[in-house]
Image (tube, rainbow, N blue to C red):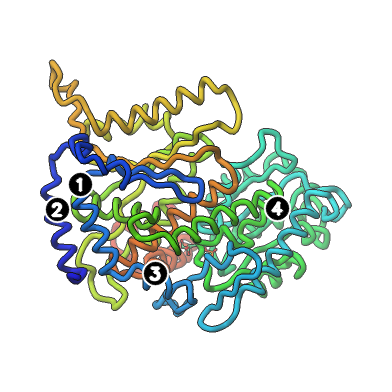
Amino acid sequence: MADAETIWTALEEAGRAAEGRSIAGLFDDPGRLERLTLEAAGLYLDLSKQPWSLADFDLALCLAEASGVADARTRVLAGELFNQTEGRAVLHAALRAPAGADFSAAGVPVSADVEATRTRIKSFADGVRAGTIGGAGGRSFRAIVHIGIGGSDLGPRVIWEALKPLDPQIDLRFAANVDPAELAQALTGLDPAETLVVVVSKTFTTQETLANAETARAWLRGGLGEEAANLHLAAVSAAPARAEAFGVPADRVFAFWDWVGGRYSIWSAVGLSCAAALGFEAFEGMLAGAAEMDAHFNSAPMHRNAPVLLALAHIFNRNAMGRPIRAVVPYAQRLRLFPAFLQQLEMESNGKRVDVEGRPVRRATAASVFGDAGTNGQHAFFQLLHQGTDVVPVDFVAVRQASEGDPAAQRKLLANVIAQAEALMIGRPTADEPHRVFPGGRPSSFILMDRLTPQTLGALVALYEHKTFVEGVLWRINSFDQWGVELGKALAGEVLKDLEGGEGAHDASTANLIQRLR
Ligand code: F6P
């Protein structure tokens, strides 16, 4: 077999040949639909509207083989220190494995700890819902305020939005931003005596989260007094001692581990607020759906492997066809936050410019991801998707049966998503006037699920986690560190000192802005 570099070159050539070619014309190949569609863990994936021919697709599969995707998958699950720059294993799959699994991180068994924590999450969630775990004054918790940011926030927000009942027993609210407006809004109308504040931070050092946690604690203290306030706190952290030092009672601190990356952490106690607000069965259902996708990813042959195929389709657009942006459009209002979740998952994981050996990468890495729910997006950015000068590939996500509401409206929603994918591909190349021309040839992936359930949501998130991993292997980068967020954090500390009277050295523009704000 040719080496990966030779195959990359051939794939780039294939991309140039695909430029301007009609995607619709590729359906003349009778095997196309069969080879480019598959089902996994309750998700149907259609990659036939991508710009690749079946020969290109075969070439992409060769790239996966030559790049050692299968071997990397084995090594990561074996608990090797796959996140080299931080010296950590990468084992979020261990968090959703069925009971009795046997994972180790760098030789240290972890599955017993995972199961013990899962049991604690269950009894806490059950207790909160039953009212046996309640506030200091004996009242049940009717609201939870989840404080965290990035990976400690986005996943739980997506889960809540996707699965929350129309009339929830527990009102779950979120505050991530250090902008005081968000926490002020989250706390408005709540009674401290019936509110649980869950502080989620892997490091328990994040500026935004600690600032919000302090404000929320002061709000609790103001309503309940100092001692009682602490009984309205729970925390989730890989640094549990710091959470206890903050004042959270030890039996309300839930640990996770350094081998769980922040953006891969929704399967850990980071999902505690959701488990309490939705019920543990929902949390367990998500784990089961993700575990099903794990089993598929680990055992399906490469050419029928959903995360591998999705990664290859994205790589074909990104590297062979030079497309730096991708849109993600869930045609499900309940999934409207999914694009934001993917933004962090993909851009923080794979927005890297050096490879695992620290050398500059040879080709472009993560695409920029953006999106919003359909049909709303159709009345905003779809103009550019259809007629803009850049070709922006789209991932459509659709749900056959709505969780609620009018079935006729749901049919309209589905008609729109199908029509958009078709319109982007077919276009309307001839029209009387130039501004009515749609060039077509605009690629999309289509992911369809029967219903939006904890299981299908878990499978969907795991699908994208694995696809992000596969891309990282193909690009030879470390998908599990995030050094790029450090510089801004450090400078914010310096600027804060200067806003409060310090005299740090800055460039003229920065110094001027600081002066204006003082
Ligand atoms: O934005 C950087 C980051 O480190 C993310 O990776 C992480 O999810 C987020 O900050 C929050 O970190 P923590 O959970 O430690 O508060």
Q: Relative to 473, is 154 on the left or the right?
A: right
Task: Measure the alpha-carbon separation of dots 1 and 3.
Answer: 38 Å
Type of the residue with mark 4 = Phe
Which mark is drawn over residue 14?
2
Q: What residue lies at 72% left-to-right and 52% top-to-bottom?
A: 219
Asked if residue 409 lies left or right of residue 346, the reply is right
Closer mark to the observer between disc 1 and disc 2: 1
Assign a secondary structure to mark 2.
Answer: helix
C-alpha separation, residue under disc 1 versus residue under disc 2: 9 Å
Q: Name the residue tied to disc 3.
A: 483
Residue reaching furthest to the front: 30
Is residue 405 positioned above or below 40 on the image? Answer: above
Residue type at the position of mark 3: Trp
Residue 108 vs 475, above or below: the answer is: below
Dot 4 crowding, Cα within 10 Å, few <14, some 14–19, many 20+: many
Give the mark toward the camera: 3 or 2.
Answer: 2
Q: Are marks 4 and 2 in contact (CB under 8 Å)?
A: no
Nearer mark to the viewer, of 1 and 3: 1
Q: Earlier in the sequence, mark 1 or mark 4?
A: 1
Dot 1 or dot 3: first in sequence order is 1
Q: Secondary structure at mark 3?
A: helix
Which of the two labelled residues, at mark 1 and mark 2, occupies the earlier sequence position? 2
Quadrant of the rendered image containing residue 103: bottom right
* Residue at mark 4: 280
Which residue is identified by label 1?
53
The mark found on residue 119 in the picture is none
CB-based contact (under 8 Å), mark 3 and mark 2: no
- Circle 2: residue type: Ala
Q: Secondary structure at mark 4?
A: helix
Image coordinates of residue 471 in percent, x first then y, are 33, 61
How far apart marks 3 and 4 lie (CA) works out to: 34 Å
Q: CA distance from mark 3 to mark 2?
A: 34 Å
